[in-house]
Amino acid sequence: MSNLIDWFANRRKSVPQTPKQQEREIADGLWTKCPMCGVLAYTKDLQANQMVCLECDHHLRVHSDERIRQLIDGKTWQPLKENLLPTDPLKFSDRKAYRDRLADYQNKTGMTDAVQVGSGHLDGLPVALGVMDFRFMGGSMGSVVGEKLSCLIEHATQEKIALIIVCASGGARMQEGMFSLMQMAKISGALHRHREAKLLYIPILTHPTTGGVTASFAMLGDIILAEPKATIGFAGRRVIEQTLREKLPEGFQTSEYLLEHGFVDAIVPRTQLKKTLAQLISLHQPFSPINSQEEEPQTTIDNEEEVINNNN
Ligand SMILES: [Zn+2]
């Protein structure tokens, strides 16, 4: 098998492709070009490595379906509130009517709004999981995103299970004005009740996590994880520089900078994410598996006694 893979790899190197051929294959989705190092990778190889570049470790963007596949054990995913649809309370229109914009994104992504929520098993452990999808209007948080996440958190509180939210967002959704800003308080309130029930919440900050999402649930975790080199911040660099009239340090809105300054607890490469989450959640289980294991030596002793008795 590995010989066959080598053969393909060598063949790939030896046959120079014309730029036109390359473009066509990229368009077909057969190959993906790393936006960081520019190396072309066979999309299937890249997917097998969880969309992390095999050359430079750059974490390419992952949409919500793929993320759920990466984290949740096969056939255990149960979506929640799938039929919740966004409305247009302000009858908002910029270059395009908000209603039309929503319809476009729904057609393009097959999603109703910018988040998927549900429950399932992560390495056999029950979890509630929310995954934001940057493809849908930049993962912006409107009423539907807020309502779905609040329902998810309430579900986690009720079922007494750990909560994970994968964040990827440009912030609050301008087209819903005040309604989208109110979601920050609503989600934070639901998280407070989850916390009062002494349950674990882990947000995962991926590229980019900004605006109202950073200002609410992204930063309210018990343990805050981030993917390498993700942009994490509230306002954009230019806005802050103009307000403070100060030059900001290089790379100040990255996972690495935030880890150094105590806003993030750990940077976890995507290929290690599921394993790390499973370890953290099992450490925080109210009924540790250690308790059930304690009974096992007892049974062996009983058996030994039985053996001794039988021998007698
Ligand atoms: Zn790369």
Image: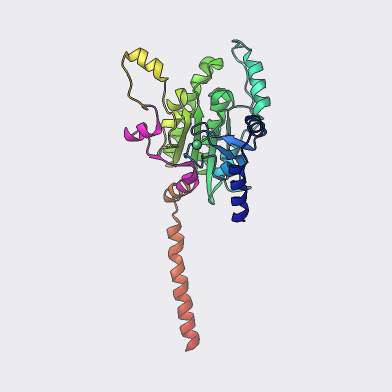
**Residue 12 rendering spot, x and y as whole percentages:** 61, 43
Can residue 132 be found in the magenta stretch?
no
Image quarter of the N terminus: bottom right
Q: How many numbered tags mark residues here?
A: 0
Quadrant of residue 119 in the image? top right
The reply to whether residue 119 is visible in this rendering is no
Task: Between residue 38 and residue 306, name the one nearer to us.
Answer: 38
- Looking at the rendering, the stretch of residues picked out in magenta corresponds to 253-277
Give the residue at x 46% y 75%. Answer: 302
Report the coloring of the rendering: rainbow
In the drawing, does residue 267 fall left or right of residue 10? Answer: left
Question: Up-down: is 217 above or below 121?
Answer: above
Q: Indicate whether residue 269 is drawn in magenta.
A: yes
Residue 67 pos. (x, y %) = 56, 39
Q: Where is residue 4 in the image (x, y as percent from the top left)?
A: 63, 53
Instruction: Looking at the picture, tell me which residue is in the foreground, 6 or 77.
Output: 6
The residue nearer to you, when weighing 47 against 151, is: 47
- Asked whether residue 29 appears in the rendered view, the answer is yes
Residue 16, x across and y down, in percent: 61, 38
Q: Residue at point 49% right, 80% down? A: 306
Relative to 234, is 128 above or below?
below
Location of residue 264 (image quadrant) = top left
